[in-house]
Image (tube, grey):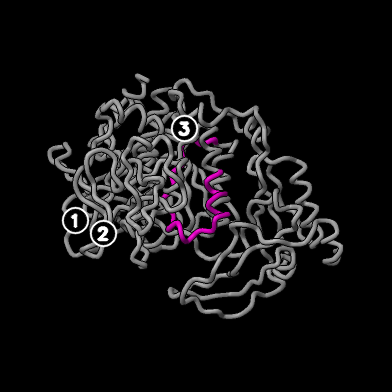
Amino acid sequence: MQDESDDEQLFGKHVALPGSERSIPPLAQEIGPVDPEEKIDVTIIVRPRSSGRAVPEEKLRRSPPGKRRYLTREEYASSRGADSADLEKVSKFVKQYDLAIVEVNQARRTILVSGSARMLSKAFNATLKRYRIADGTTFKGRSGAVHVPSSLLPIIQAVLGLDDRPQARAHFRTFRFARAPTISYDPPQLAKLYDFPQVANGQGQCIGIIELGGGFSKDDLSIYFTNLKLNVPELTTVSVDGAVNSPTGDPNGPDGEVMLDIEVTGAIAQSAKIVVYFAPNTDRGFIDAVSTAVHDTKNSPSVISISWGGPENSWTSQAMQALDQNFQAATLLGVTVCVASGDGGSSDGETDGLAHVDFPASSPHILACGGTRLVSSMGQVKSEVAWNDEAEGGGATGGGVSDVFPLPDWQGSANVPLSANPGRHKGRGVPDVSGDADPETGYVVQVDGTSAVIGGTSAVAPLWAALIALINQALDAKLGFVNSVLYEKVEAEASSALRDIENGGNGAYSAGPGWDPCTGLGSPDGTKLLDALRAL
């Protein structure tokens, strides 16, 4: 290893990496330094290659789904992946600090490095300490910015892994409130109520599911699908950053999320392949999981379901940019990403008195899924309103106006209101669509040996992911980024493919005619949506 003066001569002085600043959570207790010899894995993300060979995103998303020409994953790697010279420069830098290069991925634009806390702290001028938060969770944290050599500042976009605080929460709610559940549904019942296409079963499709904790039991899956008189779906797991399928035994913990996602997608898109990407609940883990799924050449998911997230203000700018860039890649590859909008109403669970939206639901490159309360009678929808149980100590559909992402042009005619916050920011409206989420009209699932009723917008993301898989099969085409089509084609033509939800609210915002910051464009009529897309 060369000394720091030699390093400066080669690469320039260290400077702060914009967007990497972190602060320690309020009330977190410092419990000591990080062991200097502790092994840490870090993901470095570099800029994309600039090339005119790739399909322009704007042209792609405005084309009808059946006429889109997406990039293959190999084409994406060569046209939009990392430049080999950039990867080589960053690799040369980290080697100066005795850091091992574990993996270099051109498509994902990542370099995975591993080394001691002592050497990583020197390489990135970061002071690492251990902290404990109120629930007893301990984490390795840092405050301030990550620093990189000035010559690499244009190249390096993010350095992830020095801080491993919990980043996201699962957006599901088990029923445990004062009133007994009046209605519960199994996924096939909801598919019938929403008139999902009967001409498809998901054959030939692959649905990727992102999980940041917990796991599933094969026995639970066998019991669940046997009771539904269905076959257990083809299921594969992918380990990201060392995380694996690890059931906790607590149905109220992350196992509930994992089982909900698998059982909803598997019971509706019954012949689709399901791939679960398990990753640690950190910003690095989340981003690496999505990146792995988007660029997975082995399983090639055409739809990804994400039921995890956190308020925009809980993310660093570098992490938000990195995750959103993966969603942009999904757009070019024809992968639809469905994301839960959150269960904390217009505040997203924050206590500062302001409105917040959840990320990654606020990304303009995904389909954000809000929640409703669905009541049926005799196999027909009787009523559907925005989900809001906050007065009873429960949750409410997330939604509102982004503080980070500007209003996309495809939402330009949706009458997205200005933010309810002071300053009245004009931003991306959340959600785009909705579906049943109220635990009192929730989903029957099997988890940790127990039959339970679960709700939350966590259920809506896999519900829509399953619908997209059915439509992909029926059209023999990938919908990919569907928002522009929904807003500018389907909704504009008043095709009734989306059921407008006009009643209810989530705190600062109310449902109403047309798009609203509680339920978006509404819940699906699956068959009419398929017909509308066929007609484009």
Which comes sooner in the sequence, label 1 or label 2? 2
Q: Report the Cα–Cα distance between label 1 and label 2.
A: 7 Å
Residue 475 placement: quadrant: top left
Q: Find numbered disc 2 in the image and state the secondary structure of the residue it sits on.
A: loop
Position of the N terminus, as image quadrant, is bottom right
Residue toward you, 271 or 20: 20
Image check: 533 left or right of 211?
left
Q: Which residue is mark 2?
A: 175
Q: Percent from the top left, x then y, of residue 350?
A: 37, 64
Residue 410's disc is none
Q: Which residues are magenta?
A: 300-325
User: How many numbered marks are there?
Assistant: 3
Q: Which residue is mark 3?
A: 480
The local crowd at label 1, few if under 14, some if 14 to 19, many if 20 or more residues have their Cα within 10 Å, is: some
Q: Percent from the top left, x then y, of residue 50?
A: 67, 36
Which comes sooner in the sequence, label 3 or label 2? 2
Which comes sooner in the sequence, label 3 or label 1? 1
Residue at 71% from the left image edge and 56% from the top image edge: 113
Q: Find numbered disc 3 in the image and state the secondary structure of the residue it sits on.
A: loop
